[in-house]
Image: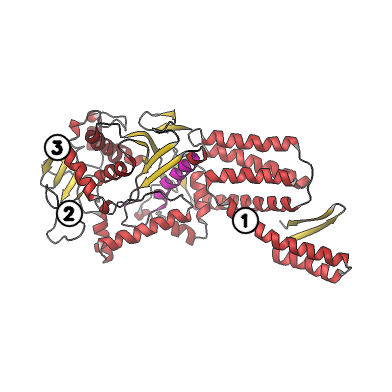
């Protein structure tokens, strides 16, 4: 496996800390609203990475956190906690809001066939670990206090900003020129960030904890460091997220984690690019913010959405349109139809293998996985798969594939789907279940013909066509059948 590493800005050979064992962490959702399709791109790309590593024989411990406290409205460490604001807006408790949108997130990743993480820790259940980490940083002199909270002094961490490729001075200038203008009073550097926020209102009775620095709640960045290291150790093999996290959130994770442990925090940083909609950034004011439920309500399957996301390379910007989704849905339907025809071939009378064709199946599989191991080049891998489908379809137009040829193609497709996660096996099983019933009727018809009960034989032929769309062909070599196209 070759992977692009954000921190080195080059493609590197993947080598985990422990042989055949991988620790993998991803920044999870802030559960104050339903996740939109831009959020889901990250988890789908990460799923392809995870499936690829599993295919290569690695065992993976995968952690995705749930941010149910501490993520403020702005990146400037000012404003209200997003979960608390949602609770006020929806007239619920913060816990009710967090639970509802956590369930919504889990439902979405399940419908998208994303392999579930081994651990999904909630921030509210790990405040002790965060306070312990803050205590270590405080004892080592990295923190200072202002009226709004306890802050990390970024000037004390050597190579702050290394993930973004900017040094401390350049990153400070970058943030000054950006949206993060409003800052808490008393900060030493514009890049300094809160590890503990003080209670803002005396009336607050939710999402507030005691600490030696005062009542309050954790900062957003400290959550990921505390939870990732609790479950995966002080150094992680892979840390995932969107490119928007590079200059701030992930940069701050590195600073506080390495300051506390004096060890390298992450070996491989895996970042996916943005998703735009109709060529524009998603925004409620533009009416182009879609959730998975919105996509399904428009008549598209979750698998069609999965396909359109993973068909683009994870490091390229992807422009989503409903028209493109329509085309992808047609493509996916044709793949499922192809899988069904493979089942029909498997039911046909056997024939000798064609050596050249069997070699083409092997070549397609080799090409597919070579491209996957080349920094998850899914577009090129899909090209290899579609070339195989085209070749097999061409063979089927002229003559039936032999059972062993059909099985070789089906096995290759199932192997591909171990990476793609498009539920090929489900469609094969459904088709084979139908085939069992069809075969029983075909055998019953043949028995009727032998008995010269032609009325019954004709009735079964009509039933097969009406119920299953199956057409029978009586040939010298026996009965063949296929689904009407």
How far is the residue under mark 1 from the one under mark 3?
60 Å
In the figure, 103 relative to 268: above or below? below
* Helix, strand or loop at mark 1: helix
Distance from disc 1 to disc 2, alpha carbons, whole Å, reads: 52 Å
125 to the left or right of 26: left
Q: Circle 2 sits on which residue? A: 209
Residue 8 location (% of width, % of height): 37, 28
| Label 1 environment density (alpha carbons within 10 Å; few <14, some 14–19, many ≥20) | few
Sequence-wise, which precedes: disc 1 or disc 2? 2
Q: In the image shown, does 293 or 323 lie closer to the viewer?
A: 293
Residue shown at 54%/39% (left/top)? 379
Which residue carries the number 3 mark? Answer: 139
Q: Tell me if I can see residue 104 in this picture.
A: yes
In the image, which residues are magenta?
Answer: 27-52
Residue extending farthest to the front is 19
The colour style of the image is secondary structure
Residue with the mark numbered 1:
429
Residue 48, relative to residue 302: is it above or below? Answer: above
User: Within 10 Å of the Cα at label 2, are there few (<14), some (14-19), or many (20+) other Cα atoms?
Assistant: some
Query: What type of secondary structure mainly makes up the magenta span?
Result: helix
């Amino acid at each position: 496996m070759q992977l692009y590493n954000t921190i080195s800005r080059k493609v590197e050979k993947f080598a985990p800390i422990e042989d055949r064992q991988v620790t993998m962490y991803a920044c999870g959702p802030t559960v104050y609203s339903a996740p939109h399709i831009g959020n889901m791109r990250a988890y789908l790309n990460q799923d392809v990475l995870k499936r690829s590593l599993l295919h290569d024989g690695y065992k993976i411990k995968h952690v995705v956190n749930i941010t149910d406290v501490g993520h403020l409205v702005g990146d400037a460490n000012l404003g209200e906690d997003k979960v608390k604001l949602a609770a006020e807006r929806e007239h619920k408790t913060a816990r009710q809001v967090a639970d509802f949108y956590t369930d919504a997130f889990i439902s979405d990743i399940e419908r998208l066939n994303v392999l579930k993480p081994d651990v999904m820790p909630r921030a509210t259940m790990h405040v002790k670990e965060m306070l312990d980490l803050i205590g270590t940083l405080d004892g080592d002199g990295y923190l200072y206090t202002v009226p709004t909270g306890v802050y990390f002094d970024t000037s004390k961490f050597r190579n702050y900003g290394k993930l973004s490729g900017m040094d401390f001075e350049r990153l400070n200038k970058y943030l000054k020129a950006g949206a993060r203008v409003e800052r808490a009073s008393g900060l030493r550097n514009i890049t300094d960030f809160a590890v503990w926020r003080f209670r803002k209102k005396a009336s607050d009775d939710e999402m507030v904890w005691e600490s030696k620095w005062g009542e309050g709640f954790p900062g957003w960045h400290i959550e990921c460091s505390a939870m990732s290291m609790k479950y995966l150790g002080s150094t992680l093999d892979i840390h995932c997220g969107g490119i928007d996290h590079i200059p701030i959130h992930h940069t701050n994770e590195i600073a506080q984690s390495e300051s506390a442990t004096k060890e390298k925090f992450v070996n491989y940083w895996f970042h996916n690019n943005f998703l735009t909609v109709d060529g524009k950034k998603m925004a409620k004011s533009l009416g182009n913010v879609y959730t998975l439920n919105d996509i399904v309500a428009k008549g598209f399957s979750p698998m069609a959405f999965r396909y359109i996301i993973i068909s683009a390379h994870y490091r390229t910007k992807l422009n989503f349109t409903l028209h493109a989704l329509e085309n992808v849905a047609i493509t996916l339907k044709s793949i499922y139809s192809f899988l069904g025809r493979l089942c029909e071939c498997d039911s046909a009378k056997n024939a000798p293998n064609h050596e050249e064709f069997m070699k083409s199946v092997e070549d397609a599989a080799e090409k597919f996985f070579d491209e996957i191991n080349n920094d998850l080049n899914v577009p090129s891998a899909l090209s290899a798969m579609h070339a195989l489908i085209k070749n097999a379809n061409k063979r089927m137009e002229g003559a039936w594939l032999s059972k062993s040829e059909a099985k070789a193609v089906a096995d290759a497709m199932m192997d591909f789907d171990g990476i793609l996660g498009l539920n090929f096996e489900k469609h094969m099983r459904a088709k084979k279940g139908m085939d069992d019933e069809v075969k029983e009727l075909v055998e019953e018809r043949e028995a009727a013909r032998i008995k010269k009960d032609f009325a019954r034989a004709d009735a079964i032929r009509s039933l097969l066509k009406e119920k299953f769309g199956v057409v029978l062909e009586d040939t010298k070599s026996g009965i063949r059948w296929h689904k009407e196209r």
